[in-house]
Amino acid sequence: MGEEERQGVDVPIEFKEDASVGWADEIANQAKKSGTVSLADFGELRDRYVTLLRRFAKIVRISDGFQLSLKELNVLLNTDARTDYLTDLSNRRDILEAMEKEMSQSNRHGDSLSVIIADIDGFKKINDAYGHEAGDKVLVAVADCLRKNLRLEDHCARWGGEEFLIYLPRSPVESAGLVAEKLRAGVESLAIAYDGVPIRVTLSVGVSEYATGESVDDVIREADEAMIEAKKAGKNRVGLYRGRAH
């Protein structure tokens, strides 16, 4: 046995049972030939080593699984924090953050950006007449209708109560007004079945176009003003913000 063998051999350890057992068998054969340790003693040591290796490998697998589950849980929690629980649309927090980014893009590239606020007319009467369960069903149906009539790049959120907020990238106010009319007509055509009774609802919609230098609050307030004017004019209609030149 050479000097290097007597001093010990550095053996890289990977957590693969077959390779590690093979390494242990090789050392056992060397020990048997050199007579430095009894085969029985080494066999016992080898068995203990393999047992510990298997336990460690199991711990590693459990740890990896736990880390993966933790990552998946974080993704779910983040999604829940940004999603309206009832309609599965974005919530207020999510759309505000997205609008900030979209407005920054608009400033940088000079693209147009319009905002829509849609409010269900007489929603309180629906809750009073049929109950909150019916009201929830109406909200879900309206949310689905809005979602299906928007482009993939458009962003729709439940703004609060029976209000919905939408922004349309690369859309001037006139184009956004056409989209708003499509949404209004789509909701008007719904017959939402509840307890054997078809419930029909309408939307009052306001539209505003973002102007460079405005804040998120500014453009939302303008769309809200246009929506209020639509309600004053008789509801179930679209109003465009005309407080400034676009």
Image (spheres, rainbow, N blue to C red):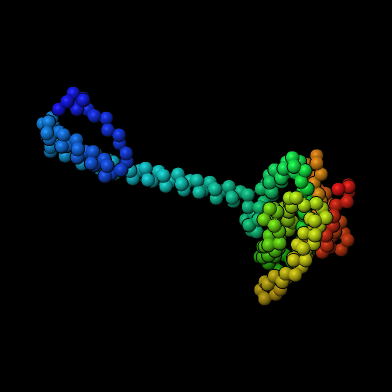
Of all residues shown, which one is farthest toward the top? 3
Residue 20 higher or lower than 198, as above or below: above
Q: Residue at the location (74% across, 65% down)? A: 187
Q: Nearer the viewer, residue 60 or 80?
A: 60
In the image, taking residue 18 as reference, residue 114 lies left or right, namely right
Q: Is residue 132 visible?
A: no
Q: Position of residue 196 (x, y in %)?
A: 67, 76
Q: Position of residue 171 (x, y in %)?
A: 77, 52
Q: Position of residue 130 (x, y in %)?
A: 71, 69
Q: Residue at the location (28% across, 44% down)? A: 17
Q: Nearer the viewer, residue 186 or 106?
A: 106
Query: Split into 4 quadrants, where in the image is the N terminus?
Result: top left
| Res 234 → quadrant | bottom right
Residue 83 higher or lower than 29, as above or below: below
Q: Residue at the location (71% across, 45% down)? A: 102
| Res 146 → quadrant | bottom right
Q: Position of residue 66 (x, y in %)?
A: 43, 46
In the image, taking residue 123 as reference, residue 246 lies left or right, namely right
Q: Nearer the viewer, residue 137 or 145?
A: 145
